[in-house]
Amino acid sequence: MPHTIVEKILAAHAGQSHCKPGDFVVADIDFAMLTDARAPGAMKALSSLGEAPLRFVDRTALVLDHYSPPPHLEAAQIHDRMRSFAQQHGAQIYDIGEGICHQLLPEKGHVSAGDLVVGTDSHSVTYGAFNALGIGVEGTDITAVMAFGKLWFQVPTSIHVTLNGRLQPGVWAKDITLHMLGRLGADGANYQAIEYTGSAVQAMKIDGRMTLCNHAAELGAKATLLEADAKTLDWLRAHGARDPKPVSADADATYARKITVDIDSLSPQVARRHEVDDIVNVGDVAGQKIQAALVGTCTNGRLEDIRQVAAVLKGHRLAPGVRMIVTPASRDIYLKAAREGLIETIVSAGAAFESAGCGTCISVTGHFTPGDGQAVISSANRNFKGRLGNDNAEIWLGSAATVAASALRGVITDPRDIDHVNWSDL
């Protein structure tokens, strides 16, 4: 019987020869992640376990990234409880400034091809970039994983998306994700797995593949999955991952939908204010005035993104009246950017850096709140009204290149119009 990638991974982890969409399975978890945003619920659920031993706690990472740094006493106390729990029970902990959970898990070797990984954030779908099944769950589910090492799942149907061609200079994986949002709509893949294949995927670096998978959360996807290739295996090996067990779909697997996208003609995309799926070509909104720019988050805070920003800003200054924040996805990325001179280039242009974390993206820290009537262009994954702490401000989404070009000009700008950048070199 032919199967998709998600069906194969769930069946293998449930100890079954096969499973099909709609089936319920109880599957072994390879690794779990708990952020500070969901820690209170998880800690409360621990009391319901009584004296049950936490035999699988060493397969769990506690990440202090959402309330980072803690903006109030309650958050600081949550962090202290997480530190104490990790020390007492042997869980891995990543403290303030270490990075965003979805970057840290693969970066620290906790994710490998063929794995089933769960985390308390919808963007756990990012791990599909490594041919792993990443699924977002609640904090109480992580408590169950620490005690029993298992969770139940309903097997989703799958959508097969072939990305033909190759991204043109100045166009990035972010633009593909925005195009898919415009094509399918928010929640257009609700409780479905997406398999991305094709020459455009093969040509992408790992950073771009992580963006491609990450943004599927806005489509409502239960998971996003890429096949493992030499790039995947080399990256996993370099980061100390467990032995990979690559999984590929069968040629005649059954899909709910099959979609083909020709990437050669794709231009930079922008999500207009308040709606993640109100997508237009950047040229349709070029000239829209902006007052603030944000690059970073779990979607586009990787080295590839920071290089795009530096290429645009090198030797120049931000447009008058524009402020810009860059948030790297991890401390390791920040240090690599520093060694390449990217930090100095960007700061010299008038931008500022935040420590690695989620606080800016979700406005928990309040470090980047826009004023009434202001427009922000961001490389984050969501532009919901009030996302940055002010219902009376606008948020537009684009690639890091589009954000940087817009910050340089003071209006939304096609990055390909920045003459001093040779995008083919990046």
Image: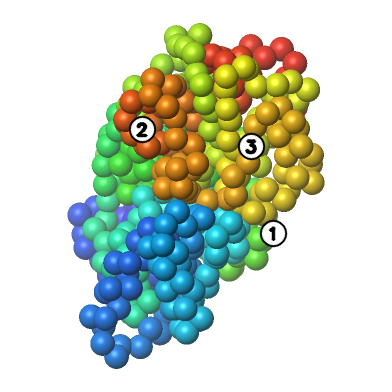
Q: Which mark is residue 413?
A: none
Q: Is residue 11 visible?
A: no
Q: Amino acid at mark 3?
A: Ala
Q: Indicate the colouring scheme.
A: rainbow
Q: Amino acid at mark 1?
A: Ala
Q: Residues within 10 Å of mark 2 (few under 14, many from 20)?
A: some
Q: Nearer the viewer, mark 1 or mark 3?
A: 3
**Residue holding disc 3:** 352
Q: Which mark is residue 390?
A: 2
Q: Nearer the viewer, mark 2 or mark 1?
A: 2
Q: Left or right? Give the position of 359 relative to 305.
A: left
The quarter of the image holding the N terminus is bottom left
Q: Amino acid at mark 2?
A: Asn
Q: Residue at x 28, y 73 (%)?
A: 44
The quarter of the image holding the C terminus is top right
Q: Residue at x 53, y 51 (%)?
A: 357
Q: Percent from the top left, x then y, of residue 315? A: 78, 22
Mark 1, secondary structure of its residue: helix
Q: Left or right? Give the position of 280 relative to 286.
A: left
Q: Which mark is residue 238?
A: 1
Q: Residue at x 33, y 26 (%)?
A: 392
Q: Nearer the viewer, residue 67 or 400?
A: 67
Q: Percent from the top left, x then y, of residue 260? A: 41, 27
Cα distance between the residues tagged 1 and 3: 30 Å
Q: Percent from the top left, x then y, of residue 26? A: 27, 70
Q: Is 279 above or below relative to 13?
A: above
Q: Is residue 85 visible?
A: yes
Marked residue nearer the N-terminal end (2 or 1):
1
Cα distance between the residues tagged 2 and 3: 21 Å
Q: Is 277 above or below relative to 143?
A: above
Q: Is 361 above or below relative to 54?
A: above
